[in-house]
Every structure is written in C-alpha cells, then in structure tokens.
Image (cartoon, rainbow, N blue to C red):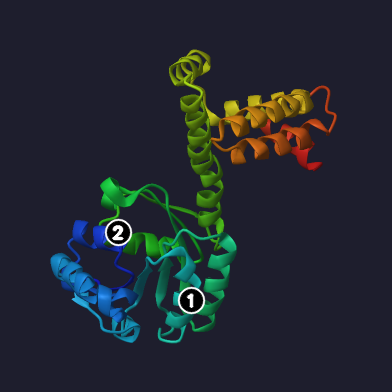
Amino acid sequence: MEQEIGLIGFGEAGSTFAMAGDWTASAHVFDAKTDDAAARDAMLARYGEAGVSAADTLVDALDGISLILSLVTADQALAVAQAAAGLIVPGTLYCDLNSVAPQTKQAAAQAIGAAGGHYVDVAVMAPVDPARLNVPLLLSGEKAGEVEARLQALGFAKTRVVGEAVGRASSIKMIRSVMVKGIEALTAECVLAASEADVLDEVMASLDASERPRPWDERADYNLDRMLVHGLRRAAEMEEVVKTLEGLGSGAAMTRGTVERQRAIGALGVKVPPEGLGAKIGAITQD
C-alpha cells in the first residue's frame, strides 16, 4: 500500500481492517488505551501483531497524514474529531466510521471543516468480523467520491457514495437499526416469555406457520395498513399482552412501546388507507 493513513482507534474494527489490508507501517495508529497503564501493554502488543506504526500521541498519528480514519467508541467520536481538527492541515480527508447520529457527525464535520479539512461520513453497514474489508460502507460528503477511491485502494471492496450531505450515510445506518436491533429486542422479549410460560416450541412453530417472506417495502406497506385500520383494537390486545408478560416476570418494555405506537396510529381514524407505502406514511405524518 503506497498511501499513508492516520488511524484513530485500534479496537475490533481498526485492528481487523489493518490486518486484513496488510496496512503495516503505512498506518500510523493512536489509541487512547495506550495512555492507560493497565491497558497499554496489551494495546502495544496488538499494534505489533498488526505490524502498524505505533504513535505515542494523537499528534504523532496525524502529523503529515492526508487520510484519517476515525474508529473509536460512539461516545468519543465528536471529541476525537474536535481534537483532530486542531492538528490537521488544510485538505486533509477525515473519514468518520463511527456509529453515531447524523447530528453528531454534522457537529464533527463543522470542526473539521473549520480547520480546512474535508469530512466524510462513513457508515459501516455490517459487523466487521467476519466481513473484514468486504464489509459494506456507505459514504456521504462533498469529498465522498475521492474518499471512496482512497478506501478502495486500501482494500475495501464494497463502497457506495449515497450523497454529498454529511449525515445521509449515518441516517441510513441509524434508521435501519430501528428495525434490525428492534427485531433483536422483540425476539428476546418474545422467547423469554415463551420459555417462562413453557410454550416456546408452540410459539416458534406458530411463527413459522404464519411468516411469509416478502420484500421489506411490501411488508412495511402491509404493517402500516393494519395499524391504520386496526390500531386501536390492536393496542387494546397488546395491553393484555403486557399483562401477560408482566405476570410472567419476563419484561414488557418493547410491548409497551407497541401499545403506544398502535394506539397513536389507530387514533388517526383512517378508515380506508391509501394505496402505497409513501401514501400511508403521508397519512400518518399528515403530510
């Protein structure tokens, strides 16, 4: 690899990418854990395993580097961008791969932009292990196209530019997580209750019998149709589900939210839902 990069953060994502791409000494890495005496030796060992160039400070990691990848914990993403802004030279490409809200990325972009750098919002759309450099990446920002070429040169195989507005890529990731992580939470709530009631096998079989694979736009259109027409009745039913789960002691946090959402949409009083997902969304939002 000919280009040098500054890599901020060397947790699972950073170390996985560096080793998969054989970035070795071309990657100048700083991780705040090296400032912690209890964690320093383990982090330095990780650097050594990957063969990357260890930086003692953030200044050392970014000095003279035109491409920076930020891969830190979500609560540190903005602070790291603000710190980096005081160290970069004009024209630096700052790639924020952290899983944070679009508002957080926009605030970080302001800091980088004020320093003359170019901020690119990068959304990592799947677990980095085992995908490694095949993990899908969405990019947005004025320099997203340029950064895409630089990332492909680093070995990333599945990149796509989704627009020039910082926050667009992260919006896709964050909103998608409503469904992905929500289904995980609903799964836990369902199976824990079913196990406690000793009906797990029957519930799983019933779900298998009723589930028909379909594209998500069709599924979303159908779900909103049912909520618009039957939301109030379904809310009342789900109140009883809440009682069931609370009686079992397995928890009903997700189901209580379902009651609220079903009731709110049902209360709109739409007797005949309009055709199409977009029209149904408009009916709900009053647009």
Q: Secondary structure at mark 2?
A: helix
Badge 1 marks a residue whose secondary structure is helix
Dot 2 crowding, Cα within 10 Å, few <14, some 14–19, many 20+: few
158 or 185: which is nearer to us? 185
Q: Nearer the viewer, residue 206 or 74?
A: 206
Q: Residue furthest top?
A: 209
User: From where the camera sits, is residue 52 visible?
Assistant: no
Residue 31 image offset from top left, x and y in percent: 31, 74
Check if mark 1's residue and mark 2's residue have beta carbons within 8 Å.
no
Which residue is pictured at 52% across the width and 27% down the height? Answer: 215
Amino acid type, mark 1: Ala
| Residue shown at the point (54%, 61%) measured from the top left | 164
For marks 1 and 2, the one nearer the N-term is 2
Location of the N terminus (image quadrant): bottom left
Which residue has dot 2 on it? 12
Where, quadrant-wise, is the C terminus in this rendering?
top right
- Which image quadrant is residue 92 in? bottom left
Residue with the mark numbered 1? 79
